[in-house]
Image (cartoon, rainbow, N blue to C red):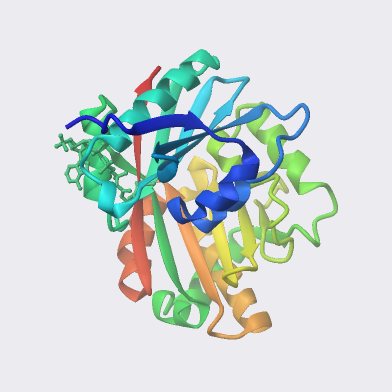
Amino acid sequence: MTAGAMTEIRSVDFRSVGQLSHLTFPAFARAFSEAPRQGSQLRLHRLAAFERDNPIGLALATMDAQSGHAELRSLVVDRPHRRMGTARALLQEMETRLRDDGGKLVSTLFSDQLPGAAGFAALLADAGWSGPKPERIRILGRVGKTGDVFRDRERLVQRALRDGLTIVSWRDHDGDPRSLILREIEAGRAPDWTQIGLMADTVDPDFSMILTDGTGEVVGWVICQFHAEVRRWGFPVGWIHEEHQKRGWLLVAYAQGAHFIESRHGPDAVAVFESSSGLPMMWRVLEHRFAPHADRADLMMISKKSL
Ligand SMILES: CC(C)(COP(=O)(O)OP(=O)(O)OC[C@H]1O[C@@H](n2cnc3c(N)ncnc32)[C@H](O)[C@@H]1OP(=O)(O)O)[C@@H](O)C(=O)NCCC(=O)NCCS
């Protein structure tokens, strides 16, 4: 079926997003209601579907003007109006607008636990996007339970410290961890995804860490963000240089992170650990070691389309 003759797709501006917030998630409603920032290379696209001026669907996307990489952040159609082609029409129009704005590639990330995940995947396939595949794994649990995950924590930590691992929080680091990380990525010593969330003002300097080896060389880092609205500590990035992956150093850093959060905020503080498909070893550890003790575990699926 195609979107009804009464359905109109229109671009909406940031001031209207507040009235459409029932058609997206709170974090996106907030981010897309902000006035455009002068000189920002991230452009925001908002499209709504209306039936007789009544909003029934909303699509939100961002576009990095420099790389031409666009991301579909949210696509929702009001329940009574589903299966009438509205999402298909919104998606098609969004792709056209992104292409006209210089977009080369569009991707989307969504949780496999999202109630509408199967329907969304079917919609993407219908619109010619690549089949969704696992991109990130997320494990959510109370830090007090990490004792169950790391029964051998003390032994692991002691061995890593003997092997020369040093873990320094960003707060205690005597340089500027953000510039240091960007320099490492620039020099090709670390992959690009290791800067996810680096610039966010939610970064928690007490639980974000820089890892060095016995010679003082930087071999990895952990980025920790505090999300005040849900009182959660997220670990979107934990990365360690390939040659140290087998030594379990990253696991030790996570164990220490959880331990520090527990000492400061108690055993019920909630942490979210993540790994990307670029770190298969860490992925397996989270899947096999953490997930059985987690309150929630999900996979972030990625789907893409060339514009
Ligand atoms: C996913 C969603 C946006 C689809 O909206 P919609 O307007 O109902 O989708 P359309 O009618 O345009 O569907 C177009 C095609 O996509 C596929 N599709 C859409 N929903 C589907 C479902 N629930 N099950 C199977 N296929 C589905 C079908 O191929 C459909 O064509 P058809 O109806 O001719 O078979 C809607 O179900 C929704 O808002 N879900 C909740 C929010 C969500 O999960 N959003 C995605 C992540 S942000």
Above or below: residue 296 compared with residue 224: below
x, y percent for residue 176: 81, 47
In this view of the protein, can residue 192 be seen by the observer?
A: yes
Number of numbered markers: 0
In depth, the one of 221 and 269 nearer the eye is 269
Residue 104: tell me if it is visible: no
The residue lying at 59 percent from left, 76 percent from top is 259
Quarter holding residue 284: bottom left
- Above or below residue 7? Residue 264 is below
Q: Position of residue 133 (x, y in %)?
A: 29, 39
The quadrant of the rendered image in which ligand 1 is seen is: top left
Q: Is residue 104 above or below residue 54?
A: above
Q: In terms of image quadrants, where is residue 260?
A: bottom right
Front position in the image: 186 or 120: 120
Is 199 placed left or right of 248 in the picture? right
Furthest-right residue in this view: 174
46 w.r.t. 213: above or below: above
The answer to which of 85 and 223 lies nearer the viewer is: 85
